Amino acid sequence: MSDVARLAGVSTATVSRVVNGRYGVSASTIAQVRSAIEHLGYESSLVATSLRRSRTNVLGLVSHSFQSYTAEVLKGVAEALTQSGFDLIIYANSDLYGTYSEGWERRHLARLSGTLTDGCIVITPSGDMRSNTPIVAIDPVRDSTVPSVTADNLAGGTTVVEHLLALGHRRIAFIAGRSNLEAAWLREEGYRRALASAGVPVDPTLIARGDFNPESAVPLARALMDREDRPTAIFAASDGMALKALEVAKELGLSVPGDLSLAGFDNIPESALCDPGLTTVDQSMYRLGFEAARMLRSLVNGNWEGPHQIVLPIRLVVRGSTAAPRTP
Amino acid sequence: MSDVARLAGVSTATVSRVVNGRYGVSASTIAQVRSAIEHLGYESSLVATSLRRSRTNVLGLVSHSFQSYTAEVLKGVAEALTQSGFDLIIYANSDLYGTYSEGWERRHLARLSGTLTDGCIVITPSGDMRSNTPIVAIDPVRDSTVPSVTADNLAGGTTVVEHLLALGHRRIAFIAGRSNLEAAWLREEGYRRALASAGVPVDPTLIARGDFNPESAVPLARALMDREDRPTAIFAASDGMALKALEVAKELGLSVPGDLSLAGFDNIPESALCDPGLTTVDQSMYRLGFEAARMLRSLVNGNWEGPHQIVLPIRLVVRGSTAAPRTP
DNA sequence: CTGAAAGCGCTTACAG
DNA sequence: CTGAAAGCGCTTACAG
């Protein structure tokens, strides 16, 4: 900027005024500055500007992983921000599948919202976030008070287990997700309620503790499938984990759905591609992202009228991976 | 930071030293500062830090759209950066499907690379980018001199048209992509060469000018399908456009592949889901992203040994949307 | 209409 | 071992 000022023969203050279209600059000066900018190919530094200004018109999104789930959410977020006047910055840390350290999101949120962003979306945070700018959480932790958007995970868990029960399954295992997430807890709760309603007692040994990371499901699925009294169906709390379970079943020479029915949750694109197709719960991650962005936008502008906790409907998607259990 | 300094009874310089783990601070002072940081929940501002420092350990990615293609690329980029010590910032502008303005990427690149990022990946840039930090382009413009990663688009275009020729098609239309992109040009060149090799003259009226934006294909596909001398096959330069053409065909009551064969390019997840499945060229967008990130990382670290233009192999994926033409 | 100066939150020589 | 001061690239009252 100082180069521009020198070339145009004015102060940096004036250059700044021209760049930001402030009133009170003579036409001839504007022309001079413009031509100097053009000549030098000058662009103002986002960083310096945001350090000085309070409003940046940039929204942030913090996510610790970058799998199908996140990609779908992102599409929704981007769509909601189209023509909104807000740009989007996504911050992903390098420690992709690292420990789900409580601190990560909080730290990066703070680093961004200090000055760079006017507000942030946090995907599956590991704790209750706090910031001096608005936040919207997608899939918050349990008992979160932060504005949030989630699918109706309770209904989803119930529906898919009811589907398995209706097929005739009674020994239904569950691979749980990260237990501090509300979504994981409600899916499990749905599982329990559906069983209870059907008068099927919950067998605690059939509940395996995963963490939504697909890899975490591998040993759990193997253990369940190796049992003498193998369950006839497994419901995994995410498609990522269910797909890993499907791989394990193939390794073990189990046919799905012949020997074992398998169901997931999310409906990521891969679930329609695998063989057999995965029965799952569609939670429209796209809409999760879309609604979160819409909410954040209004929150930042101070004109949000809706509720602070949004719950979106789900839909059971039945594919080839579930069928009636083999009669003994 | 000044709050921390005050609470700990030291200068901000000392706080900075503690935060950054610099040598030459007494153990007791470190403890004091640490506890003040803890107490206040202090996090250094990314913006302020990057303004002052030259190296930030943050890599940038600039993209103007956010569709399936981008999402796949992103997964690869994120994977390549895992445990690399680099964080990733993705910048997406709000003007999603706006005009492909030459200026956009250039402007944002400048705004980021000024201080925030140590280097950037640019996806399908609209011009040749220039920056004071390293850049890697995914799908660059023609005759670009910037380091880049692309699929073997020439082979891809040739292969898919050879496939159509082998099925017996002779009137094969082509819906082109953004002509300034090397990828678009090479796909078209592949189309031309395959026809030439087979001794089929190119009919210029069968070449429609799209721009990779799926919507751009709608009127073009309609025009091609409305012709009395309708082509028996259409090859679209991207799956996004091909899928739109498929929709148009359905609207018009044309059966695919009965009345018309359809092929695309990219192999986005949706191409396997549509009905019929889309015959296409798999260019592994994941690997595009992965290789670009690997290259950028080394470029920034100053230890890149490989070539500056990487071309990745492609693979023809035959699905239900192509078949022999109906014999008249 | 324009410039000199202060300051956004940091880091880093330079003194001590 | 620690602090005062300068400066990263901007913007914005405050004078003039």
Image: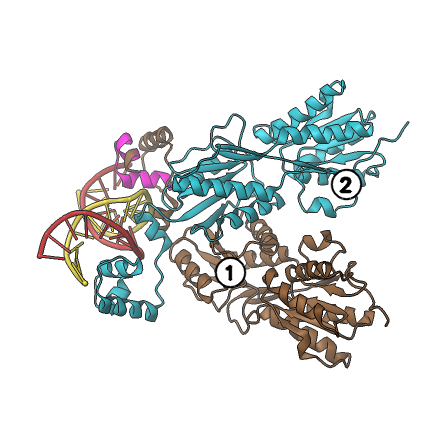
Chain colours: A cyan, B brown, C yellow, D red
Residue nearer the viewer, A127 or A187: A187
Is residue B324 on the magenta stretch? no
Q: Which residue is mark 1?
A: B122
Task: Please report, as a chain letter, where disc 1 is located.
Answer: B
Q: Position of residue A305 (x, y in %)?
A: 44, 35
Horizontal side of residue B6 vs A57, given as left or right: left
* Relative to B273, residue A238 above or below: above
Name the residue type under label 2.
Arg
Residue at image mark 2:
A319
For the residue carrying disc 2, how many other residues have a C-alpha within 10 Å: few (<14), some (14-19), or many (20+)?
some
The CA span between labels 2 and 1 is 38 Å
Mark 1 neighbour density, 10 Å: few (under 14) some (14–19) many (20 or more): many
**Rendered-image quadrant of the C terminus of chain B:** bottom right
**Which percent across, then down, holds residue B60?**
47, 54
Is residue B19 inside the magenta stretch? Answer: yes
Q: Which segment is the magenta one?
A: B4-21
> Which residue is located at x 33 percent, y 52 percent?
A49
As rendered, which of B152 and B211 lies closer to the eye? B211
Q: Amino acid at mark 1?
A: Val
In this rendering, would B170 be left or right of A104? Answer: right
Nearer to us of marks 2 and 1 is 2
Q: Position of residue C16 (x, y in %)?
A: 17, 42
Label 2: chain? A
Q: Are marks 2 and 1 in contact (CB under 8 Å)?
A: no
A227 relative position to B282: left or right: right
